[in-house]
Image: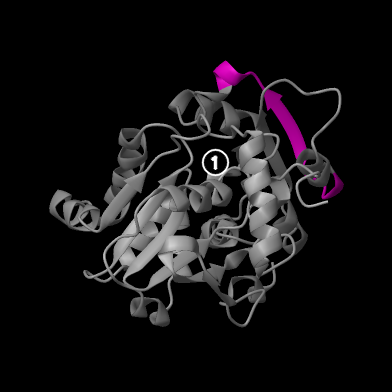
Amino acid sequence: MSNFLFNKPLFFEEVQLQKIDYYHWGECTVKRFDQIHAEINGNKWFKLKYNLQEAVRREASCLVTFGGAYSNHLHAFAALSAYHNLPCIAIVRGERPLVLSSTLRFLEERGVALFFISRSEYADKESEEMKMWIYEKWPGAYLIPEGGSNYLGLNGAMEMVSSGDGFYNHWLVCSGTGTTAAALLIQAPEYVKVHVFGAIKGKASVENDIRTRLRWFFHDEEAVEDCMQKCVIYDDKYFGGFGKQQPELIEFMKNLNSDMQLPTDVVYTAKMFFQMKQIKKPNAGSVLIFHTGGLQGNPEFIFD
């Protein structure tokens, strides 16, 4: 593997900042991680970076990871396969469909082997039994968890924060596994509030995921609590939970793109911007929004 793969930055000189006047929030700055690369963008490169480095260090025989049919993680995983010679295997949730999604077609085009398992089996993806099965089936494999959500992924996501971000009092970010949110909380100065918009229903689940990942870094409950004091959590109470969408959301995405030249994804960022309209702006202060990408997973008709 070429050494340049791990140099920072890899695909970009700097992240573009877009100023928008967003309803009652006033002027906000959007950190456009969705623009850093055509195929490997958002927070995905950061969470995969050190996992790939570790796989090379261990001289792994192949890379194995998990994801759904429209997974942004799998898409980035496949795109990065061009930068190394390791065979890549994607364990996909559910039975193989008659027609593959555009994401899964992209994986096959990049030479990633697809291995489908039932949803009940997939639910046990983090179990020791699943890990043993993987290592027996693919000896010498390096296993990357879904979403790149492990200690190495957390450390990579911390690099999404730069020195200038401390100018802002409020940081906003979406959350799936909680890894990126935890990374921002670790990096945020004490005066910053990190507003986390979960992609699932239930604030308790979002909070639990974030706390779990903070413990990977700190191993100290007092430090975890200090971080959580900076955290404000919202869940998806408008559209029914993870991956759920309604015509109102699609129309909102189209208008946001047309009015502000700001494309969003249907699972994460669109719901965050929608919910921002519904809640009262926090106390005075400047606002920085981390755009985590994921546009590849949108249905084709959204921005046609």
Q: Quadrant of residue 193?
A: bottom left
The x, y position of residue 190, in whole percent, is: 21, 69
> What residue do we see at 37% from left, 32% from top?
202
**Measured along the vertical axis of the image, is residue 252 above or below residue 206?**
below
* Side of 121 where 199 appears, left or right: left
Q: Is residue 139 visible?
A: no
> Viewer-proximal residue, 296 or 250?
250
The x, y position of residue 214, in whole percent, is: 30, 51
Q: Is residue 190 visible?
A: yes
The x, y position of residue 249, in whole percent, is: 61, 41
Element at badge 1?
Answer: helix
Q: Write down the residue under mark 1.
A: 146
The x, y position of residue 301, in whole percent, is: 80, 44
**Measured along the vertical axis of the image, is residue 139 above or below residue 261?**
above
> Viewer-proximal residue, 41 or 89?
41
Mark 1 packing: few (<14 Cα in 10 Å), some, or many (20+)? many
* Side of 36 where 286 appears, left or right: left
Specify start and end residues of the magenta stretch as a single range. 109-121
Q: Residue furthest left?
A: 222
